[in-house]
Amino acid sequence: MTRVGCCGKASVFVKASAFLFLFAFGLLLLGFGTPQWSARGGQSEGLWERCTGSMCVSTLDDPLGDEGWFQTVQGLVTIGLILATIGVILTFIIMCDADRTHKKAIRIAAIVHAFVPAGLILSGVFVYWIRGEIYFAVFYLGFSWGITLTAVFVLVVAGILLAVDTDSKHLEECKEDPST
């Protein structure tokens, strides 16, 4: 009896989507934890730290940490990261258990966990950009902001690939059972 290994029966769309989810998750982790969202006056700043030279302080101890818009950005990106993590898990469940995951609920949940975090993170990224331009006289967006924005687009592509795969699975089921 030959056994197809993990991911052997999953479609190319699911495999590509799982890879993209994992890639976006890595980008989000990098953007989430690094203090390079913006630069101004010899300082670099992230969601959780502000650094001057080799000395970093928590944004909780910074006047910026008390700003409502900044806390909103932190919350949106944090919730987006958590939801994207769930999306990674769901996609790998679909990929590794392809025989049993023709259930639409799991596939739809994975699609939702691509688009919802993308929307939340995109909102946070744009709030940071717009409010940073208003709040500071000199303000330059940084590397971490850019890779977080890139992760949004990668999540959207992953969601589209899952949606296409789900639609093709539905079409196959309709061909087999015309009553659906």
Image (cartoon, grey):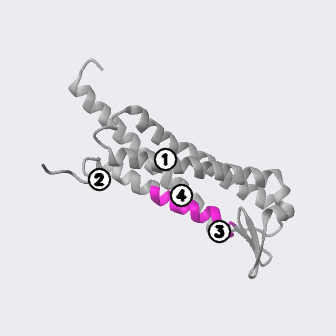
Q: Which mark is residue 6?
A: 2
Q: Amino acid at mark 3?
A: Thr
61 lies above or below 9: below
Q: Earlier in the sequence, mark 1 or mark 4?
A: 1
Q: Earlier in the sequence, mark 3 or mark 2?
A: 2
Q: Which mark is residue 87?
A: 1
Residue bearing mark 3: 34
Q: Is residue 31 found inside the magenta-colored segment of the image?
A: yes
> Which residues fall within the magenta stretch?
22-37
Going 23% across and 22% down the picture, which residue do you hit? Answer: 177
Of 48 and 175, which appears nearest the observer?
48
Q: Are marks 1 and 3 in contact (CB under 8 Å)?
A: no
On the image, the x and y values in percent for residue 82 come to 59, 49
In the image, taking residue 10 as reference, residue 117 lies left or right, namely right
In the image, taking residue 174 as reference, residue 114 lies left or right, namely right
Q: Earlier in the sequence, mark 4 or mark 2?
A: 2
Q: Earlier in the sequence, mark 1 or mark 3?
A: 3
Going 71% across and 53% down the picture, which residue do you hit? Answer: 73
